[in-house]
Amino acid sequence: MDEPLRLGIAGVGVVGGSLVELLRRQRAEFATRAGRACAVAAYSARKRRGPASSLAEAGFFENAAEMAATADIDVFVELIGGAEGAAFESVKAALARSLPVVTANKAMLAAHGLKLAALSESHQAPLYYEASVGGGIPVIKTLRESLAGNAIERVSGILNGTCNYILTRMETERMPFEACLIEAQRLGYAEADPTFDIGGFDTAHKLAILASLAFGSKIDAAAVSVEGIETITLADLDAADELGFRIKLLGVAERTPHGIEQRVHPTMVSKSAPLAQTMGVLNAVSIDGDAIGELTLVGPGAGGAATASAVASDIADIARGTRPPTFGRPAAALVEADRVPMQRHEGGYYVRLAVVDRPGAMGAIALRMGERMISLEAIMQKRASKEAAAAGVVPVVLMTHGTTEASIRDALEHAVRDGVVREKPQLIRIEREAF
Ligand SMILES: NC(=O)c1ccc[n+]([C@@H]2O[C@H](COP(=O)([O-])OP(=O)(O)OC[C@H]3O[C@@H](n4cnc5c(N)ncnc54)[C@H](OP(=O)(O)O)[C@@H]3O)[C@@H](O)[C@H]2O)c1
């Protein structure tokens, strides 16, 4: 086809701006690969770009939904962000008009993915979202297309660069959490309000998308159990190191006998596992398929150029005329996944306790564990800080063999009630590779 593919880009900030630049730079090569050139015919932003901008020739729309509904374009690219508002309204308007859509918006997909998949299908307009998870890492296509011959058992990943950066700095430079967070903000890796990242919610949105693709289930962000990294201390990182682990914020979606577990939490990962070796702002996703075994993709999870690279690959697919169903199968074939409460999670646990320094205290804790059939793999008594010694407590680290979340939590609650443990126990789940 000789006519260039006309793009309407809503949002020309970090990702949208990089996309415009990438398409300009790769113009000829992209046309050869995709079989068709593309041109930015229209854009939407809060502020119109000036005559010196590479968007000067494109039509400007203050209202993204109006652009989606009326502009003379072949593809609508949504790079505004946010689950609701201009992003959601404009994507719905584009699909309703049977325009193929490309988005990087994980928040919108986590909230409305199922509705958008149905809309995409009924209007025969493909919805692409490679950039929504793992930035430049081609994980969506890998799950949706490349691994179509596998039954997926598990997807786990480091999906938030801010958290991985903070945990890496804490570990390598022995800086406390707060100092690393300030540093991440200074370098532009963390938002002024970092709650969404460090609280694990951003990872949860991405995990919900991966879980739907992996297990053919209806996307259900509310089914993800979420814990952030705020409570991780240098004492935890030191103990992890001694025990042969690194602490990573993981998103894990896994098929279990009770249903699909979806959880985001700090995790002890064996140092030899590929995820443990993913440092700094990098992201990584490990996928277990029955035919492929384990596959790990590592790369830049954010940043304008890397994310634009993923958006451009979606545009190339549209130019070629491919139309995969949004979540890899027809929306009507997506199943309701059983929600598995965290209490049913089975695995090993790292526990750090402030144990009252008196004879019999450890015995009382061991008794509570034994009553629930929890066996211990390691016990380490740590040197008490001046403050701990003055308070009459000794730091103790335990590592359990496989048990259930309900059992370990119940045992610790009883130990606290027995008066042998002060402060809230620190509990970190250990991933399977570690057993
Ligand atoms: N940044 C990354 O590294 C990254 C990585 C992966 C995914 N993503 C996703 O990519 C999307 C865009 O992120 P970003 O970092 O590029 O955001 P950004 O830099 O804040 O850019 C947002 C753009 O949207 C425009 N905009 C805001 N409200 C609008 C409205 N009501 N109508 C029309 N345009 C509006 C802004 O206009 P003005 O420029 O005029 O203010 C700006 O051009 C988000 O969904 C994000 O989650 C980002």
Image (tube, grey):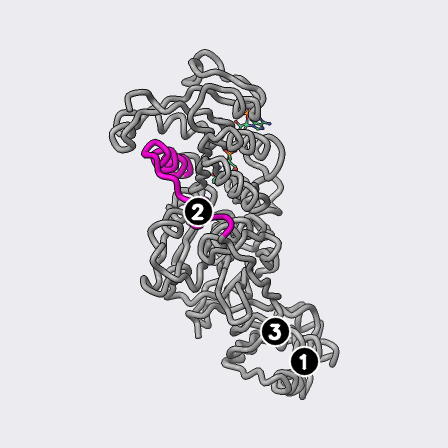
**What amino acid type is highlighted by mark number 2?**
Gly
Q: Is residue 196 above or below residue 23?
A: below
Label 3 or label 2, whichever comes before in sequence order: 2
Label 1 or label 3, whichever comes before in sequence order: 1
For discs 3 and 2, the disc positioned in front in the rendered view = 2
Identify the main secondary structure in magenta: helix
Instruction: Identify the residue shown where x is 50% and y is 17%.
Output: 49
| Residue that carries the numbered disc 3 in the rendered image | 395
Q: Would residue 314 be counted in the magenta stretch?
A: yes
The residue range painted magenta reads 307-332
Q: Is residue 311 above or below residue 179?
A: above
| Residue that carries the numbered disc 2 in the rendered image | 134
Local SS, label 2: loop
Q: Would residue 33 be counted in the magenta stretch?
A: no
Q: CA distance from mark 3 to mark 2?
A: 37 Å
**What amino acid type is highlighted by mark number 3?**
Pro
Q: Is mark 1 within 8 Å of ligand 1?
A: no
Q: Residues within 10 Å of mark 1 (few under 14, many from 20)?
A: some
| Residue that carries the numbered disc 1 in the rendered image | 357
Q: Is residue 259 visible?
A: yes
- The reply to whether dot 1 and dot 3 touch (C-beta < 8 Å) is no
Q: Closest to the observer: 148 or 357?
A: 148
On the image, the x and y values in percent for residue 197 come to 56, 48
On the image, the x and y values in percent for residue 70 come to 52, 20
Instruction: Identify the residue shown where x is 56% and y is 33%.
Output: 92
